[in-house]
Image: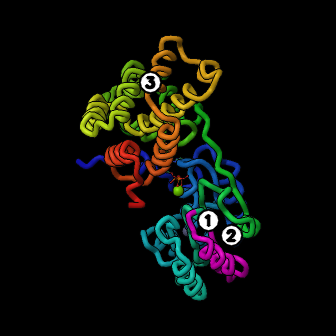
């Protein structure tokens, strides 16, 4: 049977199922109850905290003919129609791939048409920070005077990249990092539904590793559950997370420094076979590049890093083998891969490409 990633399977479908964002879900529900729905919203906040999910829930709720306490009833004509994917009244635009001015102009053309079998047409512009300058300007014109039946919801992790003119026209909601406590409770429910055994300690370790992102937490839980064959223990959890495996990361960077393509690919293979989470490993890579740069360039590197003495000596020795400019490039390449991780269907392929790109010193996208 095909395995559906936990974070896909457990996408919240109602405001009540969204965790850790009560300040937002309550406000949106109240706006629906009081008939005070706005025409332009901006959802910001760290990745995997519920922006896209809430957008979709809101789009359905505003269109419901008899909402129950601000939530879609699920029974009326509109609810039934909008339950189908690709309903024409909810228009999703991924700005990452439709970032040109023509894409936005097309939206402007279509905005003129009234909704069909719904109260509102809801335009969802995900990753809105990716729009080009001219596309922003085109969007602005639409945001200035939207018809009464149109709602725009813009979502982004990088709000600082948006022009002030856009910001000032939207009602802004900041999605919070979710606390370890809330994440643990959520995980416990998911594990029970999935009939996965776990202990309280592992729950907490996994929830902390997710660093406030619900998606990251579920995706880490996923790889641990499959490694542990649905019986999660603290020892195995720590094994999979393996965040402090200094030998491994040093070995890996040696291969990168030697431009040993085969060596790097086999290490990635080994890491995956050992059941380690490749997404966690990717984060370790940018962290290690940074640590080496600090060893190399800061007088007080040992204070900044506060590592055990023997580990610090190993880092320091390795740092000598690298040039500063290469380390800076590694930091750049690895940390931008971290944000691409969420779009990719194959973490492994992305990790491999990133490492080879970093080693060989060119950006494949620009060549
Ligand atoms: N607040 C939340 N409550 C419950 N589940 C959540 C929450 N946030 C994220 N998730 C889980 O993570 C998955 C992805 O969430 P979503 O797409 O809404 O995040 P996002 O904030 O839009 O992320 P990104 O910034 O990467 O676009 C969901 O399918 C769900 O499993
Ligand atoms: Mg999203
Ligand atoms: Zn309804």
Q: Nearer the viewer, mark 2 or mark 3?
A: 3
Are the residues tagged 1 and 3 within 8 Å (C-beta)?
A: no
Q: x, y percentage for residue 366?
A: 42, 61
Q: Is residue 136 magenta?
A: yes
Residue 208 visible here: no
Q: Give the residue number, with chain letter if any, for mark 2.
A: 40
Do the residues under discs 1 and 2 have CB atoms within 8 angstroms?
yes
Q: Classify mark 1: helix, strand or loop.
A: strand
User: Which residues are drawn in magenta?
Assistant: 130-154
- The mark that comes first in sequence, 2 or 3, is 2
Who is closer to the viewer here, 291 or 4? 291
- Which numbered disc, 1 or 3, marks the residue closer to the eye? 3
Mark 1 or mark 2: which comes first in sequence? Answer: 2
The residue at the point 58 percent across, 73 percent down is: 122
Q: Quadrant of residue 299?
A: top right
User: Split into 4 quadrants, where in the image is the C terminus?
Assistant: bottom left
Q: Disc number at residue 318?
A: 3
Describe residue 203's horizontal placement relative to residue 68 as left or right: left
For mark 1, what is the residue?
154
């Amino acid at each position: 049977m095909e395995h559906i990633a936990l974070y896909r399977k457990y996408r919240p479908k109602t405001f009540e199922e969204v965790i850790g964002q009560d300040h937002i879900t309550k406000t949106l529900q109240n706006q629906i109850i009081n008939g005070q729905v706005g025409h332009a919203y901006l959802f910001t906040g760290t990745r995997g905290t519920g922006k896209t999910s809430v957008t979709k829930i809101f789009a359905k709720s505003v269109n419901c003919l008899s909402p129950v306490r601000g939530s879609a009833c699920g029974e009326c004509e509109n609810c039934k129609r909008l339950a189908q994917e690709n309903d024409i009244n909810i228009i999703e635009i991924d700005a990452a791939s439709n970032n040109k001015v023509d894409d936005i102009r097309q939206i402007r053309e279509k905005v003129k048409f009234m909704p069909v079998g719904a109260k509102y047409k809801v335009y969802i512009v995900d990753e809105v920070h990716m729009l080009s300058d001219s596309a922003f300007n085109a969007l602005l014109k639409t945001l200035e005077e939207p018809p009464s039946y149109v709602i725009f919801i813009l979502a982004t992790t990088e709000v600082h990249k948006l022009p002030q003119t856009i910001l000032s026209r939207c009602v802004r909601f900041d999605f919070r990092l979710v606390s370890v406590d809330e994440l643990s409770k959520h995980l416990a429910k998911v594990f029970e539904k999935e009939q996965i055994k776990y202990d309280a300690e592992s729950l907490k370790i996994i929830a902390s590793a997710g660093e406030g992102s619900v998606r990251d937490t579920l995706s880490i839980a996923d790889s641990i559950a499959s490694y542990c064959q649905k019986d999660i223990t603290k020892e195995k959890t720590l094994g999979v997370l393996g965040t402090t495996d200094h030998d491994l990361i040093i070995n890996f960077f040696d291969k990168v420094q030697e431009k040993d393509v085969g060596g790097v690919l086999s290490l990635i293979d080994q890491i995956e076979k050992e059941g380690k989470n490749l997404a966690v490993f990717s984060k370790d890579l940018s962290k290690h590049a940074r640590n080496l740069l600090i060893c190399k360039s800061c007088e007080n590197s040992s204070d900044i890093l506060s590592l055990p003495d023997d580990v610090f000596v190993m880092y320091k020795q390795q740092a000598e083998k690298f040039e500063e400019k290469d380390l800076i490039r590694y930091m750049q390449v690895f940390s931008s891969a971290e944000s691409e991780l969420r779009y990719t269907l194959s973490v492994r392929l992305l990790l491999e490409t990133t490492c080879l790109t970093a080693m060989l010193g060119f950006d494949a996208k620009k060549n």
